[in-house]
Amino acid sequence: MQLTGNTILVTGGTSGIGRAMAEASHARGNQVIVAGRRKGLLDEITAANPGMAGIVLDIADPGSIAATAREATERFPNLNVLFNNAGFMPFDDAGAPVDDTVAHDVLTTNLLGPIRMTSALIGHLKAQPRAVILNTTSLLAFAPLASAAVYSASKAALHSYSMSQRYMLRDTSVRVQEIAPPWVDTDLVPAKGDARAMPLAAFVEQTMEKLALDDEEVVVDFVRQARHSIATDGSTPSSRA
């Protein structure tokens, strides 16, 4: 992925990885549009980053997705990067009754959200000379965390979808890259001093470097060995937990 000269729409851009990546991209001179549910946070972020734009988006609402796609392309006709980052991670117990409402919300946000957002923009992206779809999955897409089974499954499904999407877009101007974070110290799952969590600033720095290499699957050095082990034997301690 070229790291400059883009117009980038970031879903889930008001906190955590989304906000940090949005600000890092903005600092490189890209036009960045952050999208999220909380207008107050959008206003705060755009005020702190002059030139950045904000659009209210409820990624779980197909009508809001359609409206965001229309507004983004009308205001920013050069939009060429969609960063599907919105998501949330509740804990659960797959060995007991699962809360159906929570499971539905996780799949709607983490899986259907990126599918619907991309569907709303794919025609526009394919018309650009160069375009990129970035899908945020997780290391848990490859080795699930037993105590977050539905979240892990949603990310595994998005990983699979990304592979199919990449193949179907192989003869177009649109590239598909997948960012698979480890546990990063954000408000998604705060580390509270746990050394197993990667600092957010280090994650963003390494991710930007690897995006520039055009890797299809972006995995930071912090967990590259773990990802290699998963690919080799199909299991890790978290998947066996």
Image (spheres, rainbow, N blue to C red):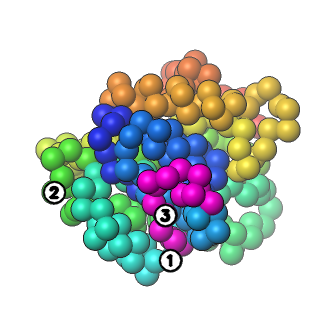
Amino acid at dot 1: Asp
Amino acid at dot 2: Ala
Image marks 3 and 1: residues in contact by CB distance under 8 Å: no
Q: Which residue appears at 45% of the width and 60% of the height?
A: 53
Sooner in the amino-acid sequence: mark 3 or mark 1: 3
- Could you tell me which secondary element the residue under label 2 belongs to? loop
Residue in the foreground of this view, choosing between 136 and 167: 136
- Could you tell me which secondary element the residue under label 1 belongs to? loop
Sooner in the amino-acid sequence: mark 3 or mark 2: 3
> Which residue corresponds to mark 3?
54
Amino acid at dot 3: Gly
Residue in the foreground of this view, choosing between 88 and 27: 27
Sooner in the amino-acid sequence: mark 1 or mark 2: 1
Residue in the foreground of this view, choosing between 46 and 125: 46
Q: Judge whether 49 appears above or below 121 on screen.
A: above
Q: Residue furthest bottom?
A: 63
Residue 107 placement, left or right of 6: right
> Which residue corresponds to mark 1?
61
Magenta-colored span:
44-58
Q: Position of residue 211 (x, y in %)?
A: 40, 31
> Which residue corresponds to mark 2?
127
Q: Quadrant of residue 78?
A: bottom left
Asked if residue 146 is among those painted magenta in the image, a careful observer would answer no
Q: Nearer the viewer, mark 1 or mark 2?
A: 2
Q: Which residue appears at 51% of the width and 70% of the height?
A: 57
Q: Which residue appears at 83% of the width and 31% of the height?
A: 194
